[in-house]
């Protein structure tokens, strides 16, 4: 019975109702993710042919 009382007291002391809800900066993270995706797409569009040529040259130099 003492254990039950201690558990209830511990729950009352550490009640999540006392803590304010944590909210992230969702629009900021969405903007960062979107900007990163656009940056990667732009770099791939600009450097894609050069990277493809480098890859093909490297593969052609490999001896079986």
Image (spheres, rainbow, N blue to C red):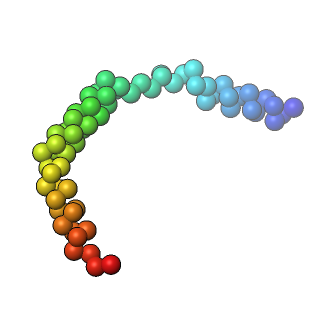
Image height of 49 relative to 11, above or below: below
Task: Give the total of numbered labels.
Answer: 0
Where residue 36 appears, x then y in whole percent? 24, 38
Q: Quadrant of residue 55?
A: bottom left
Residue at (31, 31) in percent of width and height:
29
Q: In the picture, which quadrant includes the N terminus?
A: top right
Q: In which quarter of the image is residue 11?
A: top right
* Residue 15 placement, left or right of 34: right
Image height of 1 relative to 60, above or below: above
Residue at (74, 27) in percent of width and height:
8
The answer to whether residue 63 is visible is yes
Image height of 55 relative to 6, above or below: below
Where residue 7 appears, x then y in whole percent? 74, 32
Residue at (31, 28) in percent of width and height:
30
* Residue 29 placement, left or right of 35: right
Name the residue at the right extreme. Answer: 1
Where residue 27 appears, x then y in whole percent? 31, 23
Could you say which is closer to the camera, residue 33 or residue 62?
62
* Residue 10 placement, left or right of 58: right
Q: In the picture, which quadrant includes the C terminus?
A: bottom left
Name the residue at the bottom extreme. Answer: 63
Where residue 62 appears, x then y in whole percent? 26, 75
Residue at (25, 68) in percent of width and height:
59
Q: In which quarter of the image is residue 54?
A: bottom left
């Amino acid at each position: 019975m003492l254990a039950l009382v201690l558990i209830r007291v511990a729950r009352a002391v550490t009640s999540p109702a006392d803590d304010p809800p944590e909210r992230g900066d969702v629009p900021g993270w969405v903007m960062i993710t979107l900007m990163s995706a656009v940056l990667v797409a732009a770099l791939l569009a600009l450097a894609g042919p050069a990277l493809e040529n480098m890859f093909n040259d490297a593969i052609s130099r490999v001896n079986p």
